[in-house]
């Protein structure tokens, strides 16, 4: 599972994305996507303690609902 809170925390400490990726055992691409989504949601450290990683995941990357294909 991606450590969203830890990625945002380390970014708040001004670590670069390479060091964050190494620390969180994640790819730099994942770190980049998480930080981009966090900026879009105006999330900065410190986060509300109620925002667990699963909750953050849904906030950062909401599921896109696809309309069913109908045949004509």
Image: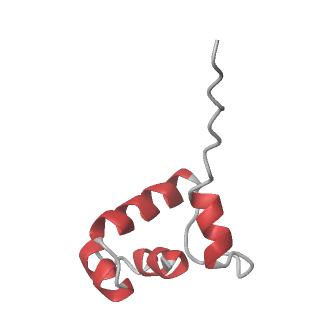
In the figure, is residue 65 to the left or right of 32? Answer: right
* Of 47 and 52, the residue lying toward us: 52
Residue drawn at point x = 55 percent, y = 68 percent: 44
Q: Is residue 37 above or below residue 45?
A: above
Q: Is residue 30 above or below residue 48?
A: above
Q: Is residue 59 above or below residue 64?
A: below
Q: Residue furthest top?
A: 72
Q: Residue furthest front?
A: 71
Q: Residue furthest bottom?
A: 23
Could you say where residue 48 lies in the image, as x and y percent from the top left? 70, 76
In the figure, is residue 15 to the left or right of 43? Answer: left
Could you say where residue 7 lies in the image, as x and y percent from the top left? 45, 77
Residue drawn at point x = 71 percent, y = 82 percent: 49
Q: Residue 53 is drawn in which quadrant?
A: bottom right
* Of 12 and 31, the residue lying toward us: 31
Q: Quadrant of the C terminus?
A: top right
Residue drawn at point x = 64 percent, y = 74 percent: 54
Could you say where residue 9 lies in the image, as x and y percent from the top left? 49, 80
Could you say where residue 20 lies in the image, as x and y percent from the top left? 34, 80
Q: Residue furthest right?
A: 50
Q: Is residue 33 above or below residue 56?
A: above
Q: Residue 19 is drawn in which quadrant?
A: bottom left
User: In this figure, what is the number of numbered marks?
Assistant: 0
Way the structure is coloured: secondary structure
Q: Residue 12 is drawn in which quadrant?
A: bottom left
């Amino acid at each position: 599972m991606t450590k969203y809170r830890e990625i945002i925390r380390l970014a708040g400490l001004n670590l670069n994305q390479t060091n964050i990726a190494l620390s969180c055992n994640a790819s730099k691409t994942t770190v980049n996507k998480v930080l981009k989504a966090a900026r879009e949601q105006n999330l900065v450290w410190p986060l509300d303690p109620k925002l667990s990683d699963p909750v953050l995941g849904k906030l950062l990357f909401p599921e896109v609902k696809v309309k069913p294909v109908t045949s004509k």
